[in-house]
Structure formats: C-alpha cells, structure tokens
C-alpha cells in the first residue's frame, strides 16, 4: 500500500499514538490487529502493543484493510487531511480528486462518480483510478463511501434523526444500500450506534468537530468580532469559551434551507461543539463542511509551519478565516474596497437592516438573514445609493448577485479556483485584489495572494518601493503553497524580527484609492 512517507513513518506514528499528540489527529489512523478496530492518535484507550499496530493515512485505507472505527475516539470527528503540494503532477491530481470528493457542493445535484470526477479534472477515468489507488491505496468510490459512512456514523451518534433521513443526507441512494454498507463495514446495525442527541427545534442539533493544535482561537474570534454584523451574527466571549453565532441559508436540491448555528470552542479537547437549528437537519453534512471551512478546522499546522515558521514565527496557530456563504463574503469584500473595517461593517449593517429577511431564532442577537442573491440582483442604484454605497460598488454587488443567482459563478470550496477567479474579474468593479480575497476565504484556496494589498505592502516593508505589488509577489514565492496563511500572518504582525518592518495596525489600515477597479486595498474584510 502506498502512503505518504513523511507522515507515515511507523515509529513516528507509534510515538504520537503513545503521547496522544493532537497535532497528528486526522493525519493517520491506527489499526489494532488484536481487536480489528482503528483509532485516532488521540484515543484514550490503553496504548496497544507496537507489534499489533498498523498505520494508515486515511480512514478509507483502514476500512479497506478490514478494520472498524473505534466507538470511543470516533474517527469521524477527526479533522480531515487537506494536502496541498508542489510535488509531482500525479500527486497533486490525486489529492485534488480527494478534495473534490470531500466537497459535497462540488457536485451540485449530480451524484459523484469516477466519470464525473475525471471530467472535472480533465483526464480519463482510467487515469483517475490509477493515480488515486497509487496514492491512497483505495479506489475513489471506496474513499467516498468511507466519507459517507463516517458522516452517517456521526449523525447516528450525535443526533436522533431518523435512519432513513441519515442515509439519504449522507449520500446513499437508498436505506437498503446504506444498511448493507454499514453492516458490511462495521459489523453493526445503524441502530446500535444510537446515542442521545438534541433535536428539538428550540435547542438545535449538537455535533462535535475536531481540529489539530496549535489553533489561535483568540485571533480567529477577534477577526470575526471586528467584522460582525448585528442581527445576522454575534460573538460571545463566554467564560467557558468563546462562542460564535450566526444565521445563514443553504440551497440544496432546489430548496432553500434557512437557520442558525452556534459554535463553541473547547480548547482543552481541541474541538468545536456545534449547535445547528432543526430547520437545517436535511443539509447537516453541508453545514458541517461549511463550518469546518469557516473556522479552518482541517488545516495541518505542521505542513504550513514547515514553510512559514522561519518568516512568521509568531503565527504558528493562525488560521485563514472562511465564510458560511461565499456569496455573502464576496458582497462584503466589495463593500470593504478601499475603506476601513469599521466603514465596511457600517455599510454591510445598513444592507442587512434594509434588505435582510427576518428569521426567528432562540438568540436575541440573531433576527435576520443576509439579503439573498436574487434580492440584490434586482436592487436598483437608488436603493443601494441611499445606503451610502457608491456607484462602482453598486455595479459590483449587483454583478456578483446576478452571477450567483444565475449559477454562473460558484463560490465554495469545491469550485474551480482559476475559472472562478477569471469569471469574477470579468464582473464590473472586481479586480485582482477582490478575486484573490474571495479565493482565500470563500474558495478556501491556501495559495491566494492579493499582491496589491496596501496593508500587506506595509507589513512586508515594500510600500515605498517603485512597484510594491511586484516586490510582494516576488517575496511570496518562498511561501508557496501556503501564501494565504502568509497573508494572515503578515496582517497580524507575526513576521520575524529580522524581517522587513511591520505595520502593527495593518489589519485596520485605511488606504487611499490607487487604481481602476479597486485592485489595491487594505485587509478590510
């Protein structure tokens, strides 16, 4: 079986297992031959003997080898393994295929298949199967089935949703196929994994999401606090741990699902407790995936820090903040062009107060939804102008809303990055800065780099040079493929003391307009 040698040196894996090192959670799984069970490296059971351990890079490999998931550490809670590389083309293609299989929104209403996967990647079916099996040791469909089974296992354990509903929202075509796959892989009936789960509409459904340390929770919470829009989101610095609440909509299968979520950080256990409104039960896997993206829970700090630590030693726990809705993020990015964070927040607040639809939630701070794309697509210049939005931004907002409403642009982690950025830059008022920023936060591209960003120029000490964007781009080559993380670290002032000067308040800088289509901006969004 082919594995990632850097991650799966058996002795190193066993040492991480013995110490229950959370930094490796999700990076490998341990199959115990004496029990037939596979576990996360953080499992609290007694450490098995070395000779009884087999190590796998993915849960699908462990299941293909005949191991069942542990009911104590629950492998479905582990952060996903997100690998971006500058290695050979086959390696990159195989991991891009896995990334697409991990993204439910990449498929729309279609059912994933090897044929569709090959079409998205621009290669033949046979080539996809060959490189995927070479890299992961299982076929693409075996990999996908493991993801579906682990999703179903989490919903069985954490909720009281009907098994029929769990089977369908986990991606199985029928309950019969779900039951057969579950029994075949785990040797248990789905009902045997039932636990108590809150499902009443006033309390919501609760699930847990794991992440790998280090994670700078304070920095992530601070980022969202500075940008929060009242009525659609709130940040609560509770003594037991910070909480983020917000409302949002998800469209799936031609139906719009509206609701709320509450995410609470438990730093001692390296997980996020997520409460989701009962109205979103039919799209739970999508909600979970979006929350993981919004909080960047699948980042691998070891891989990122190996590239960035020397340049940004103070930012090892920083993550790239994402978004629950890529369309909303794009609109807010446009509102933040060439103005401060506070000014952008004021405009966004006016937009929500004027055009946001009301919603009922248990939280006094959550009373509205962000205006849907169909509404902003029809918004006239007078309506937006009355909110203080200038003409150039009006055209950009309407352009984005129409492109999203007409499904000409997809703004989520499963979208084609290059094609989406090109489509965005064809819209009025969208330059490279805005497209790169959207790619960084909405498309979850770890190598986005807004080279024209003024705050970034200040942080890198190139603002006074003749062509600061070119100088910034040149400096960034050393940080590939993690330039999005380098940007976040530069904005936060995490550069090494021996590096170039840093603007300590760069994250709230207020630049002057510097060119057509808003291609130079501060880190306002």
Image (cartoon, grey):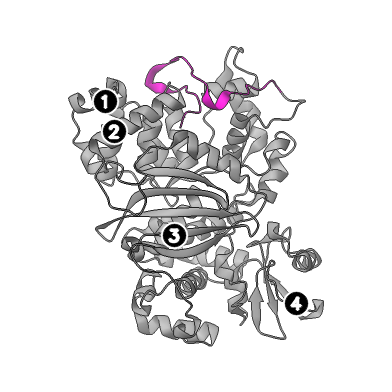
**What is the CA distance from the residue labelled 4 to the residue labelled 3?**
31 Å
Mark 3 = which residue?
275
**What is the CA distance from the residue labelled 4 to the residue labelled 1?**
61 Å
- Work out whether residue 399 can be spotted: no
- Work out whether residue 520 can be spotted: yes
**Secondary element type, mark 4:** loop
**Secondary element type, mark 1:** loop
Marks 4 and 1 close (CB-CB < 8 Å): no
**What is the CA distance from the residue labelled 3 to the residue labelled 1?**
34 Å
Looking at the picture, tell me which residue is in the foreground, 146 or 354: 354
Q: Position of residue 386 (x, y in %)?
A: 23, 23
**What is the CA distance from the residue labelled 2 to the residue labelled 4?**
55 Å
Q: Position of residue 413 (x, y in %)?
A: 45, 50
Residue 351 got which mark? 2
Mark 4 = which residue?
46
- The mark lying in front, picked from 4 and 3, is 3
Residue 215 against residue 439 in the figure, above or below: below
**Secondary element type, mark 2:** helix
Which of the marked residues, 4 or 1, is nearer the chain's N terminus? 4
Which stretch is magenta? 500-525
Which of the marked residues, 1 or 2, is nearer the chain's N terminus? 2
Q: What's the residue at 75%, 77% (across, down)?
A: 46
Mark 1 = which residue?
387
Which of the marked residues, 3 or 1, is nearer the chain's N terminus? 3
Residue 84 against residue 32 in the figure, above or below: above
Q: Position of residue 476 (x, y in %)?
A: 63, 31
> Looking at the rendering, in which quadrant would you find the N terminus?
bottom right
For disc 2, the neighbor class at 10 Å (few under 14, some 14 to 19, many from 20) is: many
Is residue 462 rendered to the left or right of residue 93? right
**What is the CA distance from the residue labelled 1 to the residue labelled 2?**
7 Å
Q: What's the residue at 29%, 43% (across, down)?
A: 404
């Amino acid at each position: 079986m082919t594995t990632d040698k850097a991650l799966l040196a058996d002795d190193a894996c066993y040492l991480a297992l013995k110490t229950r090192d959370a930094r490796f959670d999700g990076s490998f799984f341990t199959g115990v031959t004496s029990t037939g069970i596979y576990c996360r490296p953080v499992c609290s059971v007694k450490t098995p003997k070395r000779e009884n351990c087999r190590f796998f890079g993915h849960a699908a490999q462990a299941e293909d080898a005949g191991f069942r998931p542990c009911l104590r550490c629950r492998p479905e809670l582990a952060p996903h393994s997100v690998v971006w590389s500058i290695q050979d083309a086959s390696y990159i293609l195989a991991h891009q295929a896995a990334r697409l299989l991990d993204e439910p929104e990449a498929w729309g209403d279609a059912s994933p298949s090897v044929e569709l996967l090959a079409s998205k990647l621009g290669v033949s079916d046979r080539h996809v199967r060959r490189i995927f099996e070479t890299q992961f040791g299982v076929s693409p469909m075996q990999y996908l089935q493991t993801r579906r089974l682990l999703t179903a296992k989490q919903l069985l354990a954490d909720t009281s949703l009907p098994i029929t509903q769990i089977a369908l929202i986990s991606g199985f075509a029928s309950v019969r196929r779900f039951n057969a796959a579950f029994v075949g892989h785990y040797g248990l009936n789905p009902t045997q994994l039932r636990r108590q789960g809150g499902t009443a509409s006033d309390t919501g459904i609760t699930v847990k999401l794991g992440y790998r340390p280090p994670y700078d929770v304070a920095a992530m919470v601070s980022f969202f606090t500075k940008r929060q829009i009242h009525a659609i989101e709130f940040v609560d610095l509770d003594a037991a741990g910070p909480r983020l609440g917000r409302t949002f909509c998800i469209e799936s299968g031609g139906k719009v699902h509206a609701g709320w979520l509450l995410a609470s950080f438990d730093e001692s256990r390296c997980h996020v407790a997520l409460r989701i409104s009962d109205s979103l039960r039919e799209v739970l896997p999508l909600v979970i995936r979006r929350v993981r993206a919004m909080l960047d829970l699948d980042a691998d700090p070891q891989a990122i820090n190996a590239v960035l630590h020397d340049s940004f030693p103070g930012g090892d726990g920083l993550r790239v903040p994402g978004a629950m809705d890529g369309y909303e993020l794009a609109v807010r990015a446009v509102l933040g062009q060439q103005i401060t964070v506070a000014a952008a927040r004021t405009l966004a607040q006016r937009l929500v107060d004027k055009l946001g639809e009301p919603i009922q939630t248990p939280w006094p701070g959550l009373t509205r939804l962000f205006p849907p794309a169909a509404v902003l697509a029809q918004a006239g210049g007078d309506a937006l102008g009355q909110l203080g939005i200038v003409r150039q931004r009006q055209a950009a907002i309407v352009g984005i809303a129409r492109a999203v409403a007409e499904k000409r642009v997809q703004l989520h982690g499963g979208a084609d990055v290059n094609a989406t950025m090109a489509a965005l830059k064809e819209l009025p008022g969208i330059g490279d800065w805005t497209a790169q920023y959207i790619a960084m936060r909405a498309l979850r591209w770890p190598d986005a780099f807004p080279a024209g960003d003024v705050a970034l120029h200040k942080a890198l000490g190139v603002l006074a040079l003749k062509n600061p964007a070119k100088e910034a781009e040149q400096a960034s080559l050393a940080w590939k493929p993690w330039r999005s993380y380098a940007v976040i670290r530069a904005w936060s002032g995490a550069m090494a003391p021996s590096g170039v000067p840093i603007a300590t308040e760069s994250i709230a800088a207020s630049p002057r307009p510097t060119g057509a289509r808003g291609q130079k901006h501060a880190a306002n969004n």
